Image (tube, rainbow, N blue to C red):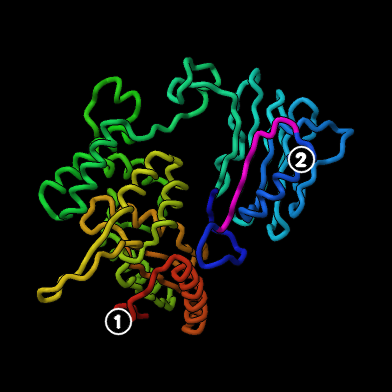
Amino acid sequence: MISTKLDKKRAFSGPELTISSCNIEGINSNKEELFADLCKENSCDVLYMQETHRGENMNNPRINGMKLAAIRPPRKYGSAIFVCSSIDVTSSQITERDDIEILTKDVGKCTVTSIYKPPNSTFEKPTNFDTKNIHIIIRNFNSYHTNWGYDETNSNGDQVEYIPGLTPELLETLEQYTDKYEADPFDEDTIEKGEELMNLLTEDYLKDPEDLKKGESNSSAEARLCPAIDDTLIKEQAGFRPGKSCTGQVLNLTQYIENGFEEKKVTGVSFIDLSSAYDTVNHGLLLSKVYQITRDYKFTHIIQTLLSNRRFFVILAVKNSRWRNIRNGLPQGSVLAPTLFNIYTNNQPISTDNNIKHYVYADDSAIAVQEDSFEAVETNLSKTLDHTGIYYRANYLKPNPSKTSV
């Protein structure tokens, strides 16, 4: 069962997209009936079948309640995709080379790819893996690796990236930390055990393999992340970036206004301050944006670990409230928080109009418009603010009315 966000309406709880996959080893009427019942019982949205062994001269497979969306029908191998009637399939793609079958479907905002690689074929990464925001892969690589419990590693196993799970040491430390956290999250022993756990995690996930071979000391996540993503951030953002500052943005804006004055232009500026900006960051959106910029699953997993399982309670007089889970926001005081916020707001709308300039420092923004008349300034500034408002609402950001002015 895989859940992701689509545009269709769903119940208030439960998965939004249910995908089933099976290496069916030849499809027949009995298996078709069985899968029809399974899809109905589990509210299956997408069904992937591999090794259907259905020749081109044979009738296409049928699953009651589902519609056939794509099929590759060779007798030797063969793959098929079924979707329920409510699923909107926007596009599809079938690729075959050296008997490797790759069937891709765009379902709403999600791309689902089925890969079947016969034992004697060489695995190659499909070209469309890095082109979608949400990509789910159903696969049968016929590859072997000792990390997965096989006795040996074959050449194909070497080419399939292995994502390690918890080592025995990590699992033991996690259990110890969980027990201490449940007893007293603010105890010094709890904090020390948490730091030990994070050190073990960063040692496993953040260090490059070459660094591990050389035995070099582990650098902090912040020191590794900032240089790696700085070139991908919008140039208008000056918050917590090398060579940029708040003073520099003030000087840039002042110079822009002075230049306009000399050219007899009218300048209008909107100053925007976001209310509790770091506290309103949506974790799901942030993790998606971190992966889009870094293309690093392991690092995205570390950020997810940093944000998850955080709780709080309130003390009023001599009474304590019950524990609440923190579902939004960045950790206060974390050295990573400013950089993560820069990533979160990196897709904010920036006008390409030469008469409109954006000056951003962390959660503060100034939008300046220069025109020949007050009316033109008002029109363009209003349009720009409308686009910015749409972005803010979609990303759960709210301007502070008392600190926002034009």
| Residue range (magenta) | 16-26
Location of residue 341 by image quarter: bottom left
Q: Going 64% across and 38% down the picture, which residue do you hit?
A: 22
Location of residue 249 by image quarter: bottom left
* Residue farthest right in this picture: 57
What kind of residue is marked 2? Asn
Task: Give percent across and percent down for residue 263.
Answer: 43, 72
Task: Give percent across and percent down for residue 149.
Answer: 45, 23
Q: Going 60% across and 67% down the picture, which residue do you hit?
A: 9
Per the image, label 2 sits on a secondary structure element best described as: helix
Task: Give percent across and percent down for residue 74.
Answer: 80, 29
Q: Going 35% across and 73% down the picture, which residue do you hit?
A: 272
Badge 2 is on which residue? 30
Badge 1 is on which residue? 402
Q: In front here: 24 or 313?
A: 24
Task: Give percent across and percent down for residue 115.
Answer: 63, 34
Distance in Å between CA atoms under marks 2 and 1: 68 Å
